[in-house]
Image (cartoon, rainbow, N blue to C red):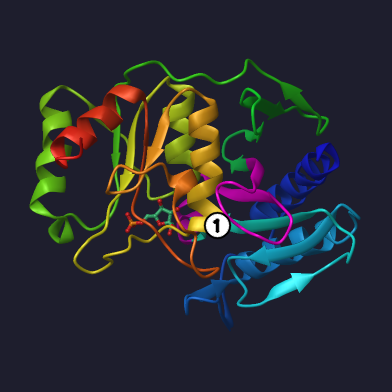
Amino acid sequence: MLTIFENIKHIALEIDKAIKEEDLGYSDRCNATGDTQLKLDVASDAIIEHTLKSNRLVGTIISEEKEDVMQVHPDGKYTVCYDPLDGSSIVDVNLSVGSIFGIYEGDELSGETLVAAAYVVYGPRLELVTVTRGEPVHHYKCDRSGLFTSQCDIYLNEKGKLNAPGGTQKNWSATHKSFIDSLFAEGYRLRYSGGMVPDLHQILLKGGGLFSYPGTSDKPDGKLRVLFEVLPFALIFEAAGGEAVDERGRRLLEIDSGHHHATSPCFFGSKYEISKMREAYGIA
Ligand code: P6P
């Protein structure tokens, strides 16, 4: 496992360089869900594929940017699902973006087989967060020599102050709108950039709050992908002492992951905010 985290450090340095040096324009290709790919999406995907293929522990890789599953090493123990450059559409306005990795044991991909997760933040500083099931959430900052130096482990407070409400507000349910408004009425601060990685990283480092991407009238199953985005952050938030649930209040790590590109409504937060969500949604 650790060598996969070492691979991710190398990937982080390579993609960070690509973001700063390469063309931000669109390619002539679409991804698995029909979005036109940026040249950076394609470059980031290629960097990750090339690097993970060198690791014999990796049996299979699945990219959010590709339809097909890629067999790498037949005796490899892990399947790595990744979103190469999440939020890439905000790179051109110089906002932070990230890469997200879910490391699953075997070929059965679910919250139960997710044994580790990691994300990289490409921001003013290059940062990495990793977790192995049952262990604390580790945080690293990259120094000028390209070394990832360990910071304090990440823990969420019982209650936070930040509210990151995703999705088009005119398409929210009345229940969701009333819940989000109730947090603002309690004095929560709006913190939403449109990049899942920096928005969740901020809540983790600031000790808590709520990130939500609900089912909406235009996207009833939400927008965020289960294998590549939702489950990795669910493992991280639970390891940090928070909760990660769907719109029925079920632990995201226990939902049926469905097909590879399935999405799910998702709520990530400190315990207080998730209890308020359950109350607002009428969940026991
Ligand atoms: P909306 C970026 O496109 C992304 O997949 C996530 O990084 C982000 O949290 C979400 O979509 C933003 O979506 O609909 O709120 O703009």
- Using the image, determine if residue 257 lies above or below residue 116: below
Where does residue 62 sit, x and y in percent of width and height? 67, 65
Q: Which residue is mark 1?
A: 227
Res. 202 image quadrant: top left
Seen at 25% across and 28% down, the residue is 275
| Nearer to us in this view, 133 or 190 | 133
Name the secondary structure under disc 1: helix
Q: Is residue 188 left or right of residue 139?
A: left
Q: Nearer the viewer, residue 33 or 263?
A: 263
Would you identify the image quadrant in which residue 221 lies?
bottom left
Cβ at disc 1 under 8 Å from ligand 1: no
Q: Residue type at mark 1? A: Leu
Do we see residue 86 in this rendering? no
Q: Position of residue 133 (x, y in %)?
A: 65, 33
**Quadrant containing the C terminus in the rendered view:** top left
In front of the other: 264 or 160: 264
Residue pictured at 89% horizontal, 54% vertical: 55
Task: State whether residue 253 appears in this view.
Answer: yes
Look at the image and tell me in which quarter the N terminus lies: top right
